[in-house]
Image (cartoon, rainbow, N blue to C red):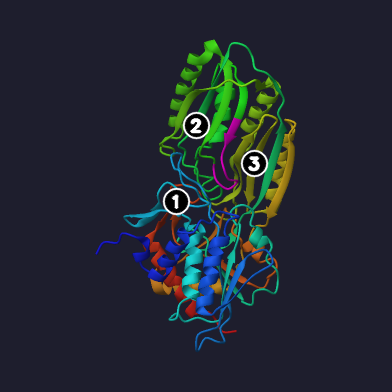
């Protein structure tokens, strides 16, 4: 029998729960409907549950018979998802369910992010705690909020709300890998005062749109050489056209933790320069297609006439903004000396938005070292300030430092090899797992992060590998059954 919907996939308890989550809109800061759905299931099952001080949701379930003396386990994931969609999608993330489909061994969504990050981790934890036939010791589920836009749920976690000894974070994206450390991060926001002047005579207005880039996760994909639409458009206007432009607007990117896939710029140019502009854009497109060969396959640039305005940015303000963007660090600045092939420090130039009077640029810098995180943030701040921007550094969160003496790591490595006849890979990740923050009020916790295989998170190409979900589920159950005694 062919399978047509994800709720028919195995293991069904997990996939049915994930399907239910896809039907409830849950972008960051709009998670309450999903939490209320989970709360209703807790009431049906008679499980202890409560919200903490910042809105995280916690569930408790006693041990099954014979496992009462095991150490307590907290299964943790974040309920929110990244709302990214294809350029031609009309999806409304505040009202519309995610439409999923199966293609071969993969589950994807129609034109949007799938929400497997971190919906599958949450679904696995819920499928376990709502089950009646899984053996386990004392269990808790911690569902955090707002991970994708600031980790405010993890930051607000307080000591005393949780009773367990071992945290299983279910938010990494390669089955068979056990994560024991992650990068910290910090937001950098630069605000430029944009002066204007009267619209110049004999000028026409055009909108240049660059789109079709892959985008992706600003931590996991930052070393993949992917294009950044904001950087590319500023590079074109500064370095690849003979046409003198007057700026009207520059908007691109949507989220601090996603590489900018699309950007648009409005400009005014002399009547006589239209053909030259189009020739320069055609040439630039060919150049970047060569530069990003085998990385970006669907880059597009369009030029569209738009209505004239009564003003343009002054040349000083416009050129200063473009130069600040062009000179801002984007991508990897250092690789780790301790973990082969892992990014140490990076920056994502993520978002630009302009109005008639201002321009705001948002970056997210990451590093395995909190010291290096702060250094790159200061470097970026100084660069923007050199162009008269007002810069704010905020939202710092720490990295998660590896614990080589982790007892649960040793147990899980042994279990993985025993059941799957291959060694688990021990990893650190250049992304902002919540473990560094969650461990602050609970320094005694032994923590591991794991998950199924997810590709292209934070982009409409997000997909999850079906066989990996079943192995992830089996390994989670093996682990719960083999938790050490207190």
Query: Above or below — where is 267 with respect to 142?
Result: above
Q: Looking at this view, is 222 or 148 the one in front?
A: 148
Residue 206 drawn at (x, y percent): 53, 22
Residue pushed farthest left? 1
How many residues crowd around disc 1 within 10 Å: few (fewer than 14), some, or many (20 or more)? many
Which of the 4 quarters of the picture holds residue 51? Answer: bottom right
How many residues crowd around disc 2 within 10 Å: few (fewer than 14), some, or many (20 or more)? many
Which of the 4 quarters of the picture holds residue 68? Answer: bottom right
Total marks placed: 3
The magenta segment: 250-259
Which residue was labeled with disc 3?
Answer: 362
**Residue 260 horizontal side relative to residue 162, left or right:** left
Q: Earlier in the sequence, mark 2 or mark 1?
A: 2
**Residue 298 horizontal side relative to residue 363, left or right:** left
Q: Mark 2 to mark 1: distance in Å? A: 21 Å
- Secondary element at image label 2: strand
Which residue was labeled with disc 1?
Answer: 462
Q: CB atoms at circles 2 and 1 under 8 Å apart?
A: no
Residue 243 drawn at (x, y percent): 56, 16
Determine the main secondary structure of the stretch shown in magenta: loop
Which residue was labeled with disc 2?
Answer: 210
Residue 374 drawn at (x, y percent): 71, 48
Identify the image quadrant of the N terminus. bottom left
Residue pushed farthest bottom? 66
Residue 97 drawn at (x, y percent): 45, 55
Identify the image quadrant of the C terminus. bottom right
Q: Looking at this view, is 202 or 252 the one in front?
A: 202
Q: Earlier in the sequence, mark 3 or mark 1?
A: 3
| Residue 124 counted in the magenta span | no
- Secondary element at image label 3: strand
Q: Looking at this view, is 101 or 223 the one in front?
A: 101
């Amino acid at each position: 029998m062919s399978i047509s919907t994800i709720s028919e996939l195995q293991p069904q308890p997990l996939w049915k729960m994930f399907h239910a989550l896809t039907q409830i809109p849950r972008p960051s800061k709009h998670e309450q409907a999903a939490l209320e759905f989970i709360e209703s299931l807790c009431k049906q099952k008679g499980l202890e549950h409560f919200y903490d001080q910042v809105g995280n949701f916690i569930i408790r379930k006693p041990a099954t018979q014979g496992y009462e003396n095991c150490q307590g386990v907290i299964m943790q994931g974040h309920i929110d998802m990244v709302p990214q969609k294809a350029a031609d999608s009309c999806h409304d993330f505040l009202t519309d369910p995610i439409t999923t489909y199966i293609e071969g061994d993969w589950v994807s969504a129609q034109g949007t992010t799938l929400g497997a990050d971190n919906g599958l981790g949450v679904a696995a934890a819920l499928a376990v705690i709502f089950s009646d036939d899984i053996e386990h010791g004392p269990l808790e589920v911690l569902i955090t909020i707002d991970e994708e836009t600031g980790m405010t749920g993890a930051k607000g976690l307080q000591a005393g709300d949780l009773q367990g000894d071992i945290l299983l974070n279910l938010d990494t994206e390669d089955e068979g890998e056990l994560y024991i450390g992650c990068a910290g991060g910090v937001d950098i926001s630069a605000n430029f005062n944009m002066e204007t002047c009267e619209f110049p005579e004999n000028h026409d207005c055009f909108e240049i749109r660059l789109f079709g880039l892959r985008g992706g996760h600003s931590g996991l994909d930052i070393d993949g050489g992917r294009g950044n639409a904001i950087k590319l458009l500023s590079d074109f206007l500064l370095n690849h056209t003979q046409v003198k432009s007057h700026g009207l607007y520059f908007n691109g990117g949507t989220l601090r933790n996603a590489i900018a896939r699309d950007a648009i710029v409005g400009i005014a140019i002399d009547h006589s320069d239209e053909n030259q502009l189009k020739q320069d854009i055609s040439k630039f497109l060919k150049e970047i297609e060569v530069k990003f060969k085998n990385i970006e396959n669907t880059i597009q640039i369009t030029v569209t006439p738009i209505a004239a305005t009564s003003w343009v940015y002054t040349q000083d303000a416009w050129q200063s903004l473009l130069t600040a963007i062009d000179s801002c660090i984007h991508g990897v600045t250092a690789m780790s000396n301790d973990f082969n092939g892992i990014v140490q420090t990076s920056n994502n130039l993520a978002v630009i938005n302009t109005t008639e009077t201002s321009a705001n640029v948002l970056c997210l810098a990451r590093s395995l070292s909190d010291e290096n995180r702060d250094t790159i943030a200061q470097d970026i701040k100084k660069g923007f300030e050199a162009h008269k921007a007002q810069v704010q550094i905020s939202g710092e969160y720490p990295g998660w430092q590896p614990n080589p003496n982790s007892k649960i790591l040793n147990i899980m490595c042994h279990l993985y090899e025993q059941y799957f006849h291959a060694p688990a890979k021990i990893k650190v990740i250049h992304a902002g797992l919540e473990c560094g923050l969650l461990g602050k009020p609970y320094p005694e916790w032994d923590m591991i992060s794991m998950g199924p295989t997810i590709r292209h998170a934070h982009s409409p190409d997000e997909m999850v590998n079906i066989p990996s979900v079943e192995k992830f589920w089996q390994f989670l159950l093996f682990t719960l059954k083999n938790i050490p005694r207190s």
